[in-house]
Amino acid sequence: MANRFPDWRETLFGAMALVLSFALSACGGAAECGCSDTVSVPDIDVPRLDAGDAADAADAILPDGGPPAPLWDDLVGTGEPVGGIVGVASHMRTSDDADPLRDFEFDQYAGFQGFRIRRGLRWNNVEPARDEWHFDQVSTPVTMAQARGVRILPLLAYGNSWAQDDPDSYGTLHIADYATYAGRMAAEFCATAKDYELWNEENITRFWDLPPDPAKYADLLIASAAAIRTACPDARVVFGGLASYDDVGLFDTWGFLRRALAARPEACAAFDALALHPYTWFQFDPPEHDEEVSFDVVKHSQTRMTTLARDILAAGGCAPKPILFTEVGWPSYDLTEDQVARYAARSLLLAARDGVEGWYWYTFWDDAPDSGGIRPEENHFGLWAWPGADDSVRRAKPAWLALKTAATLLGGSRFARDLGPALGLPNDVYCLAFVDDAGGVQLALWDGREVPDVTLDGEDAGGPDTTFALDLPLPGCTIVTSLRDMNGTMLETRPAGLTLPLLLTPQVQYLDLGCGPSASVARLAPIPR
């Protein structure tokens, strides 16, 4: 269900775009940090850092003439905790048949805080004939999610041959019949599922068949939202996840949303959250990469795609709405598994910074490693390797460990501040601050310039071996710092000083500043594998 140019029409669009691109390219003090004076850390001498010294150190790194940077003042967490953002767009079996792979998948989610899954509960399985309902064909993931403390987002799709003018074309579906299905699903699962995503990638031909029709989708959205809210008054309706390219305008990112709102302004009131699939160009570029190919052709970073969506909502007259990434990912086909792991961790952290409510990786298992077809990359998006012909293989890919590390170290923490501007960091070099409810402060740091940004004026600094040396001023609440790599391996612990020298690379590093009552021996514990 990712944006993968799967048929000849979409491949032609991709080839045209490539030709075009080649042608056109010529805590001030301890009180503010909630610090404790009696934190115990074994085998480390822990001098306290005076708040005034910390402020002096922060001022010292500012560009000449710049005002003092309140690096550590009033750090307040916003948005969802990191552990409540992360999820998977799963392909698990939906029927009530026994399935060891589904059981195994749910077992892996047990170690997370508030994990999410998105699963399609297909209309033709639920209602194979008008008014013939078979909820047993889709209910098992919902009941298992409830039992395991996992939050499920049902995807309501796709068409149904008896409810279409053309059985082979989703775009000819009868809106009233789809709305009935949506309402019945909300009535059936209201006690467990409160969000319902309406359709998937409705802006591309693969999932609409006729040329995508923003006005008809808006009508479907309005009718289905009314049915869902009648059946489950506290449910939220999610605008179906948009592919990051568009069949109508290949480089008009989220243009379908703009056209839908223009055709039916009343659609703003019909949905409560917007779903996006912010895949980067051919799922190859890293999440930070922006590239101007020409004045009209731009490859957008994840953050820029998020900003564009919010701008379109505002321009369309909509109030601000939560954004969900109901699919995001990179395949370990053209990219190495280690590259994919780096991109996954960085994408999640940027989503937290940008206020994204839910982030769903596509998907849990690889498919069979087929190298044929137009886009064999499709089979290599999993966080776990293909389980083999007999389903006996259980190998986590590096991206799984990277996400588990982020969710373990930052699970209860919320994004507080991007320290990069105050530290004078270059574009795409990051130092993000997260805080937990006990006053603990953790940082996520990396150099995201391994594929440098490109403008019409040239290419930014960076490259595969990019690094950035940072002398980080420490807040007054610092007791002891502990630094881990992207996989959770402890790199070093050291007592507090005025500054901490760090070398940032494309791999995320996590720095715990030892602030607050949560700065304890548990901070130094190994990450569960």
Image (tube, grey):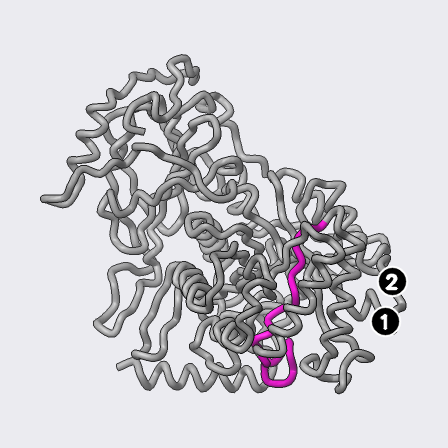
Q: Is residue 236 above or below residue 482?
A: below
Amino acid at dot 1: Pro
Q: Position of residue 464 (x, y in %)?
A: 34, 59
| Residue displayed at 53% across by 64% down | 277
Stretch in magenta: 193-213
Residue 374 seen in render: no
Q: Residue furthest top?
A: 38
Q: How packed is label 2: few (under 14 Cα within 10 Å), some, or many (20 or more)? A: some
Q: Which residue is mark 1?
A: 128
Residues 23 and 176: in front is 176
Element on which disc 2 rests? loop
Alpha-carbon distance for marks 2 and 1? 8 Å
Q: Amino acid at mark 2?
A: His
Please give the name of the residue rendered at 51% of the width and 46% of the height, measured from the top-left corner. Answer: 402
Q: Nearer the viewer, residue 7 or 441?
A: 441
Residue 28, position as x, y percentages in the image: 28, 28
Q: Is residue 216 above or below residue 428?
A: below
Q: Is residue 281 visible?
A: yes
Q: Quadrant of residue 456?
A: bottom left
Q: Position of 303 compared to 390: left or right?
A: left
**Residue occupying image coordinates x 52% and y 54%:** 322
Q: Which residue is mark 2?
A: 134
